Image (cartoon, rainbow, N blue to C red):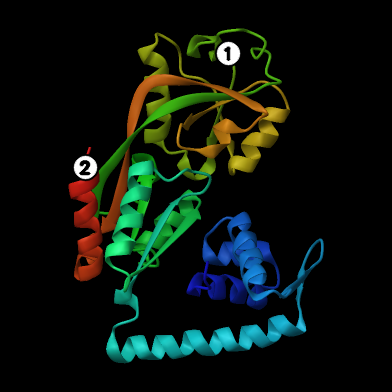
Amino acid sequence: MRIDTDHMEYFLAVVHHGTISKAAQALHVAQPAVSRKIKSLETMLGVALLERQPRFVTVTTAGQAYAQVFEQYLQAMAQLQGQYGRFKKETIRYGMFLGGNWPEPLKAYIVNFQKEHPHIQLIGTSEDVKGLREGLLSQRLDCIVALQEMLPNTNNLRQVPIAQVHRAVVYSKGNSLASRSKVTLADFKEQPCYMFRDEVTDSAKDMVAALFASYGLPAPIIRVVNNLDSVVMAFEQGDGFALLDTYQRIIHNSQFSYFELPETKIMYLAYTTEGRENPLLVQFIDGIKNALHV
């Protein structure tokens, strides 16, 4: 493991904003992602950069020194990038939905691509839906791995199908149905369906309604939650379920049960037409098209 610019940027965001939660909002990523980055940075440096309090953080003396160095480094790199236009072209940044497992074919391709192109730095990050959309549109991310409903609505979006995933009905082991040896979607027709706030669109609701209709069932009641943590908290209150995808790690939580549905969805590698101006990204994406096209 090595220190990259994400480590520096995440740490500096906390220094500037005073809390990890505010830094996460500014970066458009989930709070745990910032915490993990900074903890990883502290481990590599072998020193505490922050003193963590319940509602705020204090930068240590060592943290202040490193913050100054990181600021100087990033400013210098930005100047060089503006002068020579090389830094950004040598880096490909890609993102995936927070809490998901990278598809195995994609992981294998990335490993091989990195071996064949050691001069290219590949930086992967996990973010919530809002962060993925913002990152792609602002070109903070060169490409993202996501399902159709997670992608931003823009005319210059390009998509490469890379994997098929199954839907899963996920529910708490404290659910009133958990004691049954076998359950089906029909058993949940009276229970609420939890959906993430940034995924609740008319098209997403229509997809849920269409899924239930295909089994001859009425559309479920939709309850909106902020994130995966909110789903966990909601499940702890009793009944309810979520329609998630089998690539999401939450379905393997020991507190939950789940069963797969036969329906599949396509996972895409998405990028904008502006990305076609980066020859390294073109090479990366074209390789995925050839190796993983489904």
Amino acid carrying label 1: it is Glu
Separation (CA) of disc 1 from disc 2: 39 Å
**In this rendering, is residue 289 above or below 4?**
above
User: From this viewpoint, which residue is outermost toward the right?
Assistant: 54
Position of 63 with respect to 81 (left or right) is: right
Q: Residue at x 46, y 32 (%)?
A: 246
**In this rendering, is residue 120 above or below 192?**
below
Whole-percent x, y for residue 147 in the image = 37, 41
Residue 156 visible in rendering:
no
Disc 1 crowd, CA 10 A, few/some/many (<14, 14-19, 20+): few
Position of 206 with respect to 177 (left or right) is: left
Whole-percent x, y for residue 172 in the image = 65, 24
Residue named by callout 2: 293
Q: Residue at x 49, y 54 (%)?
A: 126
Q: Residue at x 54, y 38 (%)?
A: 249
Amino acid carrying label 2: it is His
- Nearest to the observer: residue 94 or residue 25: 94
Residue named by callout 1: 190
